[in-house]
Amino acid sequence: MSTGSTFDRYQHGDSAIHRLDPRVKVVITLLFIVSNVILPDGAWPAFAAAWGVLILASALARLAPAFLLRRSFLALPFALAAVTVLFTQPGQPLWSLRLPGSTLAISDAGLVRFASILARSWLSVQMAILLTATTQFPDLMHALRHLRVPGVIVAIIGFMYRYLFVLADEAGRLLRARAARSAGTARGSGGGRLVWRARVAGAMVGQLFVRSFERSERVYNAMVARGYRGHLLTMSPHVITQRDRLALALALIVLAFIQVAGHSL
Amino acid sequence: MYLASAQLHIPDGFLSLIIALVAWLLAVAALVAAVHRSQAQLDERLVPLAGVMAAFIFAGQMINFPVAGGTSGHLIGAALAAIALGPWLGILVMTAVIALQALLFQDGGLVVMGANILVMGVVPALVGYGLYGAAAGRGRRAQLAVAAVAAWLSVMAAALLTALLLGFSNTVSFSVVVPIMLGVHALIGIGEALITVAALSFILSARPQLLQRSAAAGGRGWVAAGVAVALLVVVLSPLASSFPDGLEWVAGETGFLESARAAPFELLPDYTIPFLGETALSTILAGAVGALLVAAVAFVLARVLRERGGANNDSRVTPGRP
């Protein structure tokens, strides 16, 4: 059903981007996203420049050219919600649709606003994908700790990552057992009334809850037996090198240029 | 249904910077209190318990059931986490789920993660646990009935908050999105209520003692706050759906919308004045002061709740259960 590789988004490699300190990568990613968010609507040259930076970084990381694009359509369902600004932003009407009772008009300002929201979100998602693809998850967690995210929260996320695969397999076994015991109908409704189907799924969730809770007790006992005292230790001390400082400075300069271009052109 | 429920994860670029930062401040305040309270209660047991239960929520979301026409419903889990694990632990667990989904799968943004934590962690803890706590000590049927309402309302509250955050960022128009969000999530909420109740019913039969810790984790403050937020949602939802222009009017009257919209774009208004123009500076300062005030209120509330909660814990160690 599910194996480790289903969830792992890391693309193994040994490029300049892979070797950057994870802290620096996290900071640059956040700055890049903030930079997109504060670009004004319709700053197309600046959005294009930001995309150029992404393409360059993706090439430096030796990822397949279409890799970021392929993974970047996650934000699309949300874009449906933003479609509404097309019709409600005041401006020159570009195109109108006559409906019985009212007219829907797309304004030029609405179109610019909509396209800008999409551009911001699409660029930001790609940068986050690049971060995840070039940084191993434990390194990412270590970086968050260095960046003063409370250790407890980082440890919880790290633990969750460790047990994601285990519990997804557990859920997969429950699903397989249900499939084996219930003959599906041709239309795939699964039989029974809707409420009954929902209750079966709910009881499975309850079962998974009990198993997870008990597993967490076993894990805790095993950890205490091995000397756990409330924090996790690591053996890879990340050191910021001259190269990392250079990369951060370069990123700051490029983002500053993008901002200047976006606000003055 | 599956796609629609994913819509609660706001991606980057859909919220204005000011809104995202205010949401972060509120989320951080809630998280600080949650870490504090959970550590006091669980000590070094906290990390394995919260980590494994966060993975449980993630895996639980895989358990789906066919609805109709090829769509399927599945658990969101925020209400279940708050009810079954207690509000503080529920917030931590949902935060881990949201952070991992954003970091690993880019499902939900990084800069807007604070907003997602508020929407999917803090609000369901308030509404879900708050309402459920009101039925603590009652019979099994009453508890499950209240849990159903709590799960449904927590989905509605999350949907309403998402729509409001998007609306105030001028990413969507209130008049269209508030009714659509509430309409769609009224249906999703029914699925969530059914699964939550069935799961709770199973846990009550199989391991009732697991739920007792959660019942002791909150306090009367949670019930009061939960009932208040739930009432707000119940009153606000129909109002917001039928008079969505009212929201835009409120936003315009208070000047909130203007500051929310203008500040990010005026951060670097014109290069004749280096960096901050006077108006932008004042808007940002106003935003920062407002955010600090809200954070201060949240901290004070958290402290009051902690003291209350502590007193309550002593008096009701084992809530009566059939």
Image: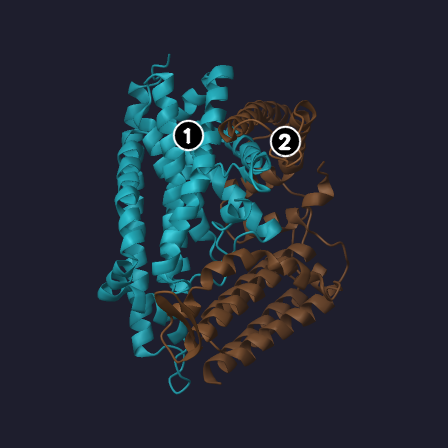
Chain colours: A brown, B cyan
Q: Which residue is mark 1?
A: B83
User: x, y percentage for residue A52?
Assistant: 64, 74
Foreground pick, A91 / A132: A91
Q: Is the residue marked by circle 1 packed among few (<14), some (14-19), or many (20+) residues within 10 Å?
A: many
Q: Residue at x 50, y 39 (%)?
A: B76
On the image, the x and y values in percent for residue B227 come to 28, 35
- Point out the residue furthest to the left here: B253
Type of amino acid under label 1 = Ile
Residue toward you, B158 or A219: B158
Label 1, secondary structure: give it. helix
Pointer 2: what residue? A171
Which sits in the foreground, B46 or B259?
B259
Residue B35 visible somewhere in the drawing: no
B140 on left or right of A57 = left
| Camera sees residue A146 | yes
Label 2: element kind: helix
Q: Chain letter for mark 1, please.
A: B
Q: Work out whether B197 lies above or below B292.
A: above
